[in-house]
Image (tube, coloured by chain):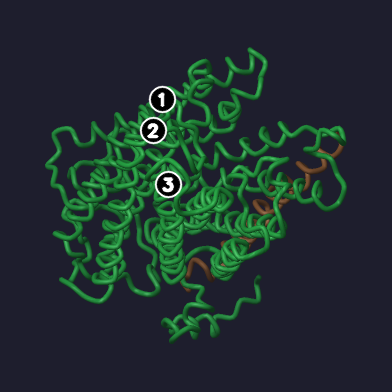
Amino acid sequence: MSAVTTDTDQHHDEHGPGYGLKRWVFTTNHKDIGTLYLFFSLAMFFVGGMMALVIRSELFQPGLQLVDPAFFNQMTTMHALVMIFGAVMPAFVGLANWLVPMMIGAPDMALPRMNNWSFWILPFAFAMLLSTLFMPGGGPAGGWTMYPPLMLQFGDAFPFVIFAVHLMGISSVMGAINIIATIFNLRAPGMTLMKMPLFVWTWLITAYLLIAVMPVLAGAVTMLLTDKFFGTSFFSATGGGDPVMFQHIFWFFGHPEVYIMILPAFGIISQIIPTFARKPLFGYSSMVYATASIAFLSFIVWAHHMFTVGLPLAGELFFMFSTMLIAVPTGVKVFNWVATMWRGSMTFETPMLFALAFVILFTIGGFSGLMLAVTPADIQYHDTYFVVAHFHYVLVTGAVFAIIGGVYYWLPKWTGHMYDEKLGKWHFWLSTIFVNVLFFPQHFLGLAGMPRRIPDYSLQFAGFNEVSTIGAFGFGLSQLLFLYLVIKCVRGGQKATPQVWEGAHGLEWTLPSPAPYHSFETQPEVK
Amino acid sequence: MSERTRDPRTRRRIVWTALVMGAVALAFYVGFILVMASHG
């Protein structure tokens, strides 16, 4: 380490972006890699969205219309895998890449070459995953939860899916290591932990969650692999194993995974609301502690996904109450966002509209989650469309709305141009109306007893399914407007000022717009 | 590259942070499978 040569480094300082394809393949720049993650995520959002439209088209009417049931099951499974691991998680990593170094006054991520590797694993992982749809027997069809013995029964695709999941896990863990190393080692002088923007805090906690649970998922799917090909019996009852054990392991990963997808969203909303309310965030330290509490609780609630497997009564009670406990720190957050807006000089630009919709609609998703936490009630709701409605309110109007709001918020900083505000508002209203048309009726379907993951259903469910499908197409088409808006903003538009938004505070807003290729070559001082 | 990332002490800290975190992740993965296997 002491053999660092200054000459080489000074030469390195003069590097700008490369040209053509090489720039993107070999880049170690946090902004380039952030952009790659965000475009990859957008592409996967549309791929996963097309799968959702296949599902909703089939469900438009009762009976089998468009696809055979086996393909329908592949669509539900792949839609989830693509949206979770391909769209939502990479979008947050992309935002972290762009913003964490700028927010803490760092020149780049701490491990830039590993950063490049983290990203470039993903296209290969998803090429492999999506290629399984063209293999004999088709893609995975047992649900994203991959429960055995169902998961072990399908064709040639199995090892490819397992390998793809390992690659996604490796990518996520490397991304998490990079974020932790950056935050702990490259903060500007004066940027103490309790002065960090909330987005940085939520990502720091998320990174620890990733390191704790991605290896658990990898371990679980490795054991599935050895059960299938190497004669072990981890999850096979005939060999002395236990298939329910897989569910415990999967959800020990799966529930923190839910928070991996929502904590950075909390961070984004905590940046947007103070800007457009023109007030500092209410209860900053309580926000930090609430985020940490949610992360801790996420490890002790997993069996609420398994209330119907026959848990001991004490177990059901424990997991019911621990799940309900999550409402406390989440309530603190919602209270703080509302208190930040209270008596603020609010304006309603597109990022703020998405943030407001997040606060209201995510809370609806939170409340339906609280309903599902009640064990006796869950036995009725389990595996119905009520669950589908619940997690789509949390993940679409929660995570996805926060990502879209964040993109509108920082797009002028990234591109140097203001986006088209009028079109942005159109995008917001169309998305918000159609997303409710899409998911709200699914609550009623679930309460009436319609099971999830089925291509056909009883006649009494027809009306709400028609409405839901119309909402799906409306929501899907509205996102084309978002794509157009982003491309338009990248190509040109009104010049953005360094601060962009009147009420914006933080180090990223002290840089010019667009942010220079190498940010903070001279360290800023935080007072 | 800034003054901060040229600093050998910072570089050492970055590498150690990454190694420790990577080792924790790897230990969770291997350890978890071993624990499961020994209780099988």
Question: Which residue is nearer to you in this view: A149 or A29?
Answer: A149
Residue contact at pointers 2 and 3, CB within 8 angstroms:
no
Residue A469: x %, y % from top left: 34, 46
**Does dot 3 land on a helix, a strand or a loop?**
helix
Residue name at image x 24 percent, y 41 percent: A356
Q: CA distance from mark 1 to mark 2?
A: 8 Å
Q: Which residue is mark 3?
A: A264
Residue name at image x 57 percent, y 21 percent: A319
Q: Which chain does the residue under circle 3 lie in?
A: A
Hue used for the chain lettered A: green
Q: In the rendered structure, which disc, 1 or 2, sits on the residue that comes first in sequence?
A: 1
Q: Which residue is mark 2?
A: A461
* Image vertical order of residue A14 relative to residue A476, above or below: below
Residue contact at pointers 1 and 2, CB within 8 angstroms:
yes
Residue name at image x 54 percent, y 80 percent: A6
Q: Which residue is mark 1?
A: A448
Residue name at image x 52 percent, y 68 percent: B5
Q: Which chain does the residue under circle 2 lie in?
A: A
Same subunit: marks 2 and 3: yes
As drawn, is A157 to the left or to the right of A326?
Answer: right
Same subunit: marks 1 and 3: yes
As drawn, is A140 to the left or to the right of A231?
Answer: left
**Does dot 1 land on a helix, a strand or a loop?**
loop
| Residue A188 visible | no
Q: Which chain is tinted brown?
A: B
Name which quarter of the figure residue A165 lies in: bottom right
Q: In the rendered structure, which disc, 2 or 3, sits on the residue that comes first in sequence?
A: 3
